[in-house]
Image: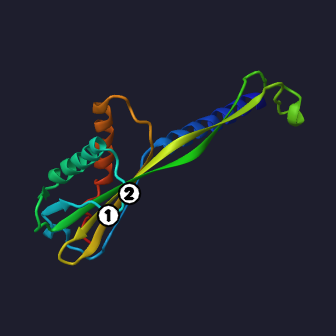
Amino acid sequence: MKVHNQMITLAFISAVLLVASLTSLAQKVRYNYLHGTDFSKYKTYRWVKAKNIEYPSQLVDEQIMRAIDSQLASKGFSRIETAGADLLAIYQAAINQQTRWTAYDSGAGYWGWGGWGGWGGWGGGVMTTTSSTIDIGTLNLDFYDVALKKQVWRGAATKTLDPPKDPAKLQRRIDKAMRKLLKNFPPRRD
């Protein structure tokens, strides 16, 4: 009976670790906005490039803006190319590297009687730890009220990057990320 309880506990801990590792791969989205702003008055926006900022390649830049344009159009916003827009839209993207540590055992051990005061024990398994460098991408999207000359909304999406070879798949990933990023734009009234 004790061995059975230990196996259930081990299975539970393994499941928790698996879920934790999967959620660490999920995209994280945050946003903030200027409270008290009437977002219903905004109908148009114009893209602006920030000075002294390195943007992704022209192809990826276009894919990002196209995905954001699509989300904003679905919310009733119109993109204009000339002065007179209600909002200025600016995005910035950055890639940082982090070290990921992975530990696993050889599976050569066993649970049995006698170890740890009769609770069973580990015998002979070899624990191996490896490290790898992963790229973490962050995209910040800002909206500025042209008339007020103030930032009114900022969203940030962060995710582990694993760029696919297929451009269509990359576009689907960007579309999904921008859909999630702009889910709460415009924010509900205060």
Judging depth in this view, the residue of 165 and 35 nearest the camera is 165
Report how far apart the C-alphas of labels 1 and 2 lie in the structure. 19 Å
Image marks 1 and 2: residues in contact by CB distance under 8 Å = no
The residue depicted at 15 percent of the width and 52 percent of the height is 73
**Can you give x and y, in whole percent of width and height, for residue 173 in the image?**
33, 39
- Depth check: give the residue in front, 123 or 100: 100
Tally of marks: 2
Q: Which image quarter is the N terminus in? A: top right
What crowding class fits label 2: few (fewer than 14 Cα within 10 Å), some (14-19), or many (20 or more)? Answer: many
Above or below, 73 relative to 142: above
Q: Name the residue rendered at 20%, 68% in the picture.
A: 39
Q: Which mark is residue 51?
A: 1
| On screen, residue 36 above or below 176 | below
**Foreground pick, 25 / 96:** 96
Q: Report the residue at 72% width, 23% height from top.
A: 107
Q: Nearer the viewer, residue 18 or 134?
A: 134
Can you tell which of label 1 and label 2 is closer to the viewer? 1
Q: Position of residue 150 (x, y in %)?
A: 27, 75
Q: Position of residue 163 (x, y in %)?
A: 40, 36
Amino acid at the residue labelled 2:
Ala
- Of the numbered discs 1 and 2, the one sitting upstream in the chain is 1
In the rendered image, is residue 1 in sight? no
Q: Which quarter shows the C terminus?
A: bottom left
Q: Which residue is mark 2?
A: 156
Residue ID at (32%, 63%): 51
Indicate the amino acid at tag 1: Lys
Residue 48 in the image: above or below residue 152: above
Which quadrant holds residue 63?
Answer: top left
Is 96 on the left-hand or right-hand side of 88? right
Residue furthest out toward the front: 52
Q: Does 161 sit left or right of 177 as displayed?
A: right
